[in-house]
Image (cartoon, rainbow, N blue to C red):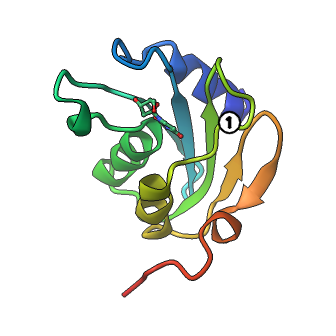
Amino acid sequence: MELLEHAKAAAKNAYCKYSDFPVGAAVLTSSGKIYTGCNVENASYGLSICAERNAASAAIAAGEREIKAVAVHSPKLKNCVPCGACRQFLAEFGDPDIITEEKTVALHELLPEAFCI
Ligand code: THU
């Protein structure tokens, strides 16, 4: 199954009762494994977490340290690119290709001069 298909499947589990904007993400790591996540919202809106950060965190929790590609899918938006916070979060673990239905771009194109230490 291609990475975007995994993201699509993950979007089906989105918990998005406040925004009604489901998102799924699938992360491909340097070991060749795939990890998925969906957005999880909260009644205290600011606590909501994006699909990309949940997918990346699942990978890291499994012991992965390098992210090669991230596919993002929302049934409501063809070019669902990661938000600013997720771009910075992902930059911690590499310069992955960001894949949407419309295009593929390198993370550094979406986040030039990322803060890294
Ligand atoms: N969201 C994501 O999960 N990823 C994105 O790339 C854009 C936004 C979520 C956050 C919130 O739950 C909902 O989509 C609306 O912003």
Could you tell me which residue is drawn at 61 percent across and 37 percent down? Answer: 72
Kindly indicate the quadrant of the structure image that contains residue 25.
Answer: top right
10 to 115, vertically: above or below: above
The amino acid at mark 1 is: Leu
Q: Farthest residue to the right: give it.
A: 102
68 to 32, vertically: above or below: below
Q: Answer with left or right where residue 57 lies relative to residue 98.
A: left
Could you tell me which residue is drawn at 56 percent across and 37 percent down? Answer: 26
Other-residue count near label 1 (Cα within 10 Å), few / some / many at <14 / 14–19 / ≥20: many
65 to 32, vertically: above or below: below
Closer to the camera in the image, 53 or 83: 83
- Residue 42: x and y in percent read 22, 24
Closer to the camera in the image, 35 or 83: 83
Kindly indicate the quadrant of the structure image that contains residue 85.
Answer: bottom left
The quarter in which the N terminus is drawn is top right
Q: Answer with left or right where residue 64 lies relative to residue 91.
A: left
Could you tell me which residue is drawn at 42 percent across and 70 percent down? Answer: 92
Q: Farthest residue to the bottom: give it.
A: 117
- Residue 15: x and y in percent read 35, 17
Could you tell me which residue is drawn at 54 percent across and 56 percent down? Answer: 31
- Residue 22: x and y in percent read 50, 20
Q: Answer with left or right where residue 105 lies relative to residue 73.
A: right
Q: Which residue is mark 1?
A: 3
Q: Farthest residue to the left: give it.
A: 44
Kindly indicate the quadrant of the structure image that contains residue 108.
Answer: bottom right
- Residue 77: x and y in percent read 68, 27
Q: Secondary structure at mark 1?
A: helix
